[in-house]
Every structure is written in C-alpha cells, then in structure tokens.
Image (cartoon, rainbow, N blue to C red):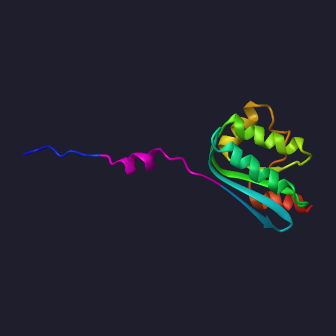
Amino acid sequence: MRPAISLATLATVQSATERVFSVRVGQVTGATVVTVVGEVDLDTAPELEFRVTRAAAAADPLVIDLSGVTFFASAGLACLLTAHGQGHRPHLVPSPAVAKVLALSDLEDFLPRSESLADALRHLAR
C-alpha cells in the first residue's frame, strides 16, 4: 500500500502567503471615516496615506477606524503623523496591534482615540 502524498499547488501557496489589506472611505453622520483592515506595512502604507490624504481634504472631521488592523508597522504610524502634520487631527479607533505601536512610540495621547467607531462619532458630535 502506498502512503498518501499531499501536494500543495501554487494557488494554495499563493493564497496562504497573500496578506489581506483594504481601505474604504465613507461619510458617516458628519464625519469622513477611513476604515482599514489587515496589515499596514511598507507595502500597504502608501495606499493608506493616499486615502487618508484625500479623506482629510474634506471639511468634515476625520475618523480612522483601525480596529480591523492585525499588524501595524512604523510606515503606518508615519501616515497618521503626516495627516496630523497637514493640519488634520484624525480621531483613531485602534486595534490592539495599533494601540501597542502607539504606546511603544509614546504617542498614545498625541492623537485622540476611542474604543469603537460609535464612540468616536459620539465624541465628534459633542
């Protein structure tokens, strides 16, 4: 009897190594919300910076919902600081990964943040 051989196809290997990343921009009750999901690193940060810069051009308050971010590199932090440096003070909804980077960078109190998107929107409505 022959032993079973398991073959990994190229498609399987590619899908196992592909990272999930998405950025959506929308309007929610008087605020522009940028929603980010996945890993923010050197490869994905330019897309995030592009979207945040365009969203910040709106007159509405800016919320960056990072609650779906699983990895947050310094390139992502640079995007947030760029938005702040352009005169926008984004309100953050950080995931644990983002909160850790903010804490390690001693920036937890530099940018306003909330525990959820609903909390951030309530804060901005005040």
Residue 106 visible within the image: yes
Instruction: Determine whether, in the image, residue 9 is placed left or right of residue 117.
Output: left
Residue 111 occupies quadrant = top right
Tell which residue pokes out farthest to the bottom in this image. 29
Q: Residue at x 77, y 37 (%)?
A: 78
Instruction: Determine whether, in the image, residue 88 is placed left or right of residue 21.
Output: right
Residue 48 x, y percent position in the rendering:
71, 48
Residue 94 visible within the image: no
Instruction: Report the front residue among 87 and 95.
Output: 87
Q: Residue at x 73, y 31 (%)?
A: 104
Residue 25 x, y percent position in the rendering:
74, 60
Q: Residue at x 68, y 47 (%)?
A: 95
Check if residue 62 falls in the magenta segment: no
Instruction: Report the front residue among 42 and 94.
Output: 42
- Which quadrant does the N terminus fall into? top left
- Examine the rendered structure and indicate whether residue 103 appears above or below residue 50: above
Q: Which residues are magenta?
A: 8-22
Residue 82 x, y percent position in the rendering:
83, 41
Check if residue 13 falls in the magenta segment: yes
- Examine the rendered structure and indicate whether residue 121 appears above or below residue 80: below
- Which quadrant does the C terminus fall into? bottom right
Instruction: Determine whether, in the image, residue 3 is placed left or right of residue 16.
Output: left
